[in-house]
Image (tube, rainbow, N blue to C red):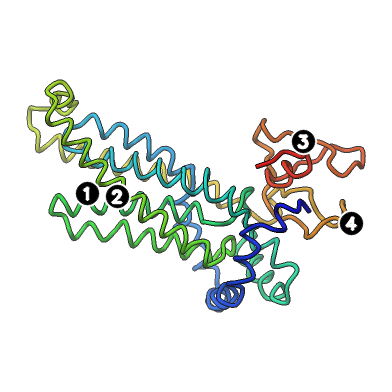
Amino acid sequence: MNPIILASIGTSIDNAFYGFDTWVYTVFGAIQNDFFTMVAKIFTSFGDEAFVIPMAIVGIVLCFFKKTRKYGFALIFAIAIGTIVTNVVVKPAVLRIRPYNTLQNTDFWDRYSVWYKAAGSLSESDYSFPSGHTTAAFEMAIATALCLRSDGKKGLSFIPPVIAVCVMGSRVYLMVHYATDVLAGFVVGTCAGVIGFFLSKLVCSIFEKVKFLDSIDVGKLFKKEPEKWGKIGVCVLLVVICALFARSFIPSLTEGGEYEQTCAYNHENFGDEADYDCYNAARVDDEKYYAFDGDNDGDDDEYCKIHWKQLQGVEE
């Protein structure tokens, strides 16, 4: 394997927190059953990019309504900051391989593999640290919760963080992240949410001082019976969020196991050169990572973006 990966920070984290991470897996493995697996899949969908990206668009729409501008900007800033830190900066720097790959070379694999399969054998195509789903869940939850609290809605403000905690737990339960991955995602997501909220307050204060910007308010179109339209707006927003969630959750019902096309990098194709059988999802839907004959057997194969880059000699 690429010496850069072997000498990565991710490998050091694997070694340093091996005992803690495997202990947490043991706790989650002990409570596995079909019901909890379904619940975990439900909550993990709140952190999926199929939900998060549309939520950023919802944030943009909210910016055009004066009453919801603060929420819109908070979501946009939080999602942007969390995404950049996690996916653009930290993951490529740390290079931590997913647990369902690295644990194959440990004594813990026999137990972990049973739990991994029981949880649906889900897989991702990128690096593991920090958890992108956890980051996304907390960046949105904290930003929204702070906005709710600032509006005096303290009771409602507890709901988003509780959902985010469940998302964090679901990633470990489904065995696709180490506990240290989700804890890092919690830190990044929380910080992104807090920063997003204060940036939102700053931008909103600027809007209030600039007459032209302050006059931007689609809500004026519904100035007749504002209370009625306000309730309708809340209902529409909830319907949209539920639809976005369904769009994220429904495909997850058929993900994993025999339905998942995994990376072709494995012992069967690469012999002693392979460090593990790669269970990462292959990038079959991405033109950037096209199929090629990485093992020189005469047939083009699909690879996850980690091994695609490695075998093509492309640096991160």
Which badge, 3 or 2, comes first in the chain's sequence?
2
Q: Are marks 3 and 1 in contact (CB under 8 Å)?
A: no
Which corner quadrant of the image does residue 206 belong to?
A: top left
* Mark 1 vs 4: CB contact within 8 A: no
Label 1, residues with CA under 10 Å away: few <14, some 14-19, many ≥20: many
Q: From this view, report whether residue 111 is shown above or below residue 205.
A: below
Q: Residue at x 40, y 40 (%)?
A: 80
Could you say which disc has been placed on residue 143 in the image? 2
Residue occupying the point 11% across, 23% down: 211
Q: Residue at x 64, y 66 (%)?
A: 116
Question: How many dots with numbers?
Answer: 4
Q: Give yes or no for contact between labels 3 and 2 (Cβ–Cβ under 8 Å).
A: no
Residue tagged 1:
147
Looking at the rendered structure, which numbered label has been put on residue 240?
Answer: none
Distance between the alpha carbons at the discs numbered 4 and 3:
20 Å
Amino acid at pointer 3 = Ala
Q: Quadrant of residue 298?
A: top right
From this viewpoint, which residue is outermost toward the right?
Answer: 297
Position of 79 with respect to 229 (left or right) is right
- Is disc 2 in contact with disc 1, using a CB cutoff of under 8 Å? yes
Q: Which residue is mark 4?
A: 271
Tell me the CA gap for discs 3 and 2: 40 Å
